[in-house]
C-alpha cells in the first residue's frame, strides 16, 4: 500500500487540487492519500473561508482518504515552521511520500534545496540571518543571500532567483525538502501552472475564489473552477452560517492589541521587538479597525507576517522557546474526516490519532494544545454572520466525519 501525504489548506479546494490528487493516483500509483491541513486559520494569518471540518469533508468527497490537522500554533507560523510541522506529522503517520507543488521546474527546486540545506555553507546561512535581522522577509533574505554567495558560474541568474523566490510555493517546496532530509519520506513535486496571487478565476487560484465569494452573492460562476462537492458544501456553509466577517475580525484584533502592553505582546508567538514596536505605534491613534489593513501596510513587514502575529495575539498563543532549532512537538494528531478503511487504519495504528471520544483522555494532559484549539474554534465561529454553529464543542475533540 503506497500512502502519500499532502500538506494543504484547501481554502478552498479547487480543480487544481483535484488535478494533483488524480495525478498521484494515475501517474504515481498512490493507493491512499492523507491531507495534513491547517485548522480554522490559514498560514497567512486570516480566517479560512469555511471551517476545518467542512473543508476536510470536501477533501474526502474529492478523493482523499483521511484529513488530519496541523496544530494552530504551527499553522499560524512562518513557512519554515508550517513546513516542519507538516513533515513531522507525515513522519509520525509513517507515510511513504509527500506531494507538494512549486511554480518552477522541480529539478531546479531540488538543486536549490541542496544548496540551502548544505550545513557546510556557513556563508549562505550567515547572509540569511543578517538579512532577516535587517528586516527583510524570509523569501527576500534567502534570495539576496543566494545572489551574494552563489558562484558566478552558477546556472541560477540573479533575475531567475528573484523571480523564483518571489513565488510562495517555491519557498514552501524548499522548506519541505529541507525538512524531509531527516525522514525516509520521498517527495513528489507537482508543477503548478496557476498564479498563486492571481485574482482571476481562470487561473485556479484559491485567493481569487475567496475574493469572488467576498464580493458576490451569486456563486454559480464557481461551478467551473471547483470540484462538485466543494461548490455544494461552500454554498451550504454560507447559506447556513453566513460569510466570515472581516470587519469583526479586524475589531477583535485591534481590541486585543489595545488590551496589552509591549512586554505582554513580546511573549506572543512570532513576535519580535521591531514588529511589536511598529504595530503599537501604528495602532495607538486608531479608534476603530476599519482602516487597520491600510494602516499596517508596510514595505518592512509582509502583510502575512503582520496578520499572523495579530491573530496569534488575539488567540493568546505564547512563544515557543527555541522553535527554530529544536524539533517540533506534536502530542497527538487530530483527525478531521476519514473514510471507513480498515487497512489504512491498521497501517496507522502506531500513530497518536484522535478519532473517538475515548482517545481524548490519553491526550488530556496537553492542555496548552487543546486550549489553543478551543480558543481558535470559539473565535472563528464568532466571525460568522449566523454564528449558531453546533460544532463549537469544548474541548476541541469533535469526532471526525466518517465516510462509507
Image (tube, helix red, strand yellow):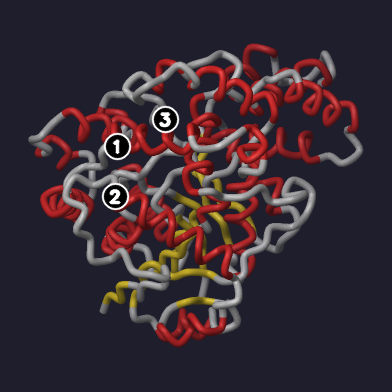
Q: Which residue is mark 1?
A: 248
* Residue drawn where x is 57% and y is 71% of the image: 332
Asked which quadrant contains residue 157, the reply is top right
- Which of the two residues, 135 or 274, is positioned nearer the viewer here? 274
**Quadrant in which the C terminus appears:** bottom left
Q: What residue do we see at 35% from left, 25% from top?
A: 289
Residue 348 in picture, x, y percent from top left: 54, 79
Question: What is the x, y in percent for residue 8?
Answer: 45, 50
Answer left or right for 15 relative to 98.
Answer: left
Tell me if residue 361 comes above or below residue 254 in the rendering: below
Q: In this view of the protein, can residue 107 be seen by the observer?
A: no
- Image coordinates of residue 309 in percent, x first then y, are 55, 36
> Which numbered disc flags the more N-terminal residue, 3 or 1?
3
Q: Nearer the viewer, residue 267 or 14?
A: 267
- First-in-chain label (1 vs 2): 1
Q: In the figure, 365 relative to 196: above or below?
A: below
Q: Nearer the viewer, residue 346 or 326?
A: 326
The residue wearing badge 3 is: 196
Q: Please report whichever mark, 2 or 3, sits nearer to the chain's N-terminal start.
A: 3
| Label placed on residue 382 | 2
Asked whether the residues under the numbered discs 1 and 2 touch, taking CB atoms below 8 Å apart as contact, a structural biologist would say yes
Question: Looking at the image, which residue is at 13% across and 54% down?
Answer: 240
Amino acid at each position: 500500500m503506497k500512502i502519500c501525504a499532502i500538506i494543504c489548506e484547501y481554502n478552498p479546494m479547487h480543480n487544481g487540487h483535484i488535478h494533483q490528487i488524480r495525478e498521484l493516483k494515475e501517474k504515481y500509483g498512490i493507493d491512499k492519500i492523507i491531507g495534513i491541513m491547517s485548522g480554522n486559520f490559514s498560514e497567512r494569518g486570516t480566517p479560512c473561508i469555511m471551517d476545518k471540518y467542512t473543508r476536510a469533508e470536501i477533501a474526502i468527497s474529492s478523493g482523499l482518504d483521511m484529513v488530519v490537522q496541523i496544530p494552530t500554533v504551527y499553522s499560524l507560523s512562518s513557512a519554515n515552521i508550517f513546513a516542519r510541522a507538516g513533515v513531522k506529522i507525515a513522519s509520525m503517520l509513517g507515510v511513504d511520500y509527500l506531494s507538494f507543488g512549486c511554480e518552477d521546474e522541480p529539478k531546479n527546486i531540488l538543486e536549490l534545496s541542496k544548496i540551502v540545506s548544505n550545513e557546510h555553507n556557513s556563508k549562505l546561512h550567515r547572509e540569511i540571518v543578517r538579512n532577516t535581522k535587517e528586516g527583510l522577509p524570509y523569501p527576500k533574505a534567502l534570495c539576496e543571500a543566494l545572489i551574494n554567495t552563489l558562484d558566478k558560474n552558477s546556472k541560477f541568474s540573479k533575475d531567475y532567483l528573484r523571480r523564483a523566490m518571489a513565488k510562495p510555493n517555491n519557498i514552501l517546496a524548499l522548506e519541505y525538502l529541507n525538512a524531509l532530509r531527516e525522514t525516509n519520506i520521498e517527495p513528489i513535486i507537482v508543477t503548478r501552472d496557476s498564479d498563486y496571487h492571481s485574482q482571476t478565476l481562470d487561473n485556479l487560484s484559491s485567493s481569487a475564489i475567496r475574493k469572488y465569494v467576498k464580493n458576490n452573492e451569486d456563486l454559480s460562476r464557481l461551478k467551473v473552477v471547483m470540484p462538485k462537492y466543494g461548490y455544494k458544501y461552500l454554498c451550504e456553509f454560507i447559506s447556513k452560517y453566513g460569510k466570515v466577517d472581516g470587519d469583526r475580525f479586524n475589531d477583535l484584533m485591534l481590541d486585543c492589541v489595545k488590551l496589552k502592553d509591549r512586554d505582554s505582546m513580546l511573549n506572543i508567538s512570532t513576535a519580535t521587538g521591531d514588529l511589536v514596536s511598529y504595530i503599537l505605534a501604528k495602532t495607538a491613534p486608531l479608534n476603530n479597525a476599519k482602516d487597520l489593513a491600510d494602516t499596517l501596510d508596510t514595505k518592512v513587514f509582509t502583510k502575512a507576517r503582520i496578520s499572523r502575529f495579530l491573530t496569534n495575539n488575539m488567540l493568546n498563543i505564547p512563544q515557543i522557546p527555541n522553535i527554530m532549532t529544536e524539533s517540533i512537538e506534536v502530542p497527538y494528531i487530530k483527525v478531521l474526516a476519514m473514510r471507513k478503511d480498515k487497512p489504512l487504519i491498521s497501517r496507522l495504528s502506531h500513530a497518536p490519532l484522535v478519532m473517538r471520544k475515548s482517545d481524548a483522555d490519553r491526550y488530556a494532559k496537553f492542555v496548552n494544545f487543546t486550549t489553543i484549539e478551543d480558543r481558535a474554534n470559539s473565535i472563528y465561529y464568532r466571525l460568522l454572520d449566523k454564528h449558531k454553529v453546533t460544532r463549537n464543542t469544548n474541548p476541541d475533540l469533535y469526532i471526525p466525519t466518517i465516510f462509507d
